[in-house]
Image: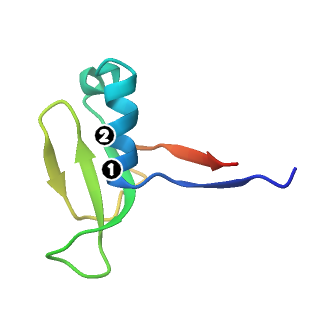
Amino acid sequence: PGSKIRISTEPELLDLNRLLGDQLEGTGYWIWTETEHEKYPGEFVLRRLRSGYRIYRYPSPHDPDYAVRFVEDK
């Protein structure tokens, strides 16, 4: 109750991965972030930690390699 849940930003995702000892890197998932891609206004960064790649597509529900990580603001 009273908590706010949102999608993490790209810097938050990278910090979380570092805190977890790079455990998110082995998943192979593209993780959607709340960070707007600087080259594509209105599109948001999908980050693949294993390879360090960044793309700007909207995640498709038909692609099993996409994930969303939520953050709870306290």
Inspect the image, locate mark 2, and give the three-letter code of the amino acid beneath it: Leu
For image coordinates 28% across by 54% down, the residue present is 46
Residue 21's place in the image compared with 47, above or below, is: above
**Callout 1: few (<14), some (14-19), or many (20+) C-alpha neighbours within 10 Å?**
few
Do the CB atoms of the residues marked 1 and 2 lie less than 8 Å apart?
yes
Q: Position of residue 47 (x, y in %)?
A: 25, 47
Residue at position x 35%, y 37% from top? 15
Assign a secondary structure to mark 1.
Answer: helix
Q: Is residue 63 left or right of residue 56?
A: right
Residue that appears at 38% across and 25% down? 19
Q: CA distance from mark 1 to mark 2?
A: 5 Å
For label 2, the residue is: 14
Quadrant of res 38: bottom left
**Disc ID at residue 11:** 1
Does residue 53 appear to the left or right of 30 in the view shown? left
- Which sits in the foreground, 9 or 31? 9
Residue 56 position, x and y percent, is 22, 64
> Is 14 or 62 nearer to us in this picture?
14
Q: Residue furthest right?
A: 1
Q: Residues within 10 Å of mark 2 (few under 14, many from 20)?
A: some
